[in-house]
Amino acid sequence: MQSFRRTQEATKHHLLMDFDGCLPIYINLSDGKLNDAKAAKEIILPAKNGVVADRTYIDFRNLYRWHKTNSYFIIRLKKSTLTSGSCLKTDINICL
């Protein structure tokens, strides 16, 4: 019988890309234990930029900080974020 390692090692890479120059302007390499929302707080988003992220980045204070720099973001919401009958104010109203 073959034995397997009980521990796993991982790294996470958080990048902020400059799409005009196709180069990263921010790179955060961390161990796999760093929470994604905490890593996103360290990103200083330049004005009028966009973010595409997964639902683990939902931190409304951080999203509001990005919003104040006239940046936009596309983030997939968790099912538990909104309840039935509630509305989310965006460029368009999304009602569940």
Image: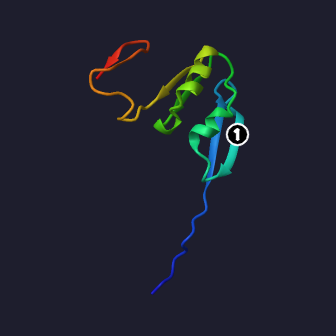
Q: Residue furthest bottom?
A: 1
Q: What's the amino acid at mark 1?
A: Ile
Instruction: Please identify the quadrant where the N terminus is shown.
Output: bottom left
Tell me: 90 left or right of 40. Answer: left
Percent from the top left, x then y, of residue 22?
Answer: 67, 31
- The residue identified by callout 1 is 27
| Nearer to the camera, 88 or 53 | 88
Based on the displayed image, in which of its 4 quarters is residue 82 positioned? top left
Q: Could you tell me how many numbered marks the image carries?
A: 1
**Element type where label 1 sits in the image:** strand
Q: Is residue 41 above or below residue 70?
A: below
Q: 10 Å neighbourhood of mark 1: few (<14), some, or many (≥20)? A: few
Residue 88 point in image, percent of width and height? 39, 18
At 55% across and 74% down in the image, what residue appears?
A: 5
In percent of width and height, residue 15 lies at 64, 37
Please state, as top left, top right, bottom left or bottom right, where the C terminus lies in the image. Answer: top left
Q: Position of residue 18 (x, y in %)?
A: 67, 27
State the residue at coordinates (36%, 13%). 93
- Residue at 57% in and 20% down: 64
Residue that appears at 43% across and 15% down: 90
User: In the displayed structure, would residue 31 be above or below residue 76?
Assistant: below
4, above or below 62, in the image: below
The image's colour scheme reads rainbow
Residue 80 placement, left or right of 45: left
Q: Nearer the viewer, residue 38 or 47?
A: 38
Q: Quadrant of residue 95?
A: top left
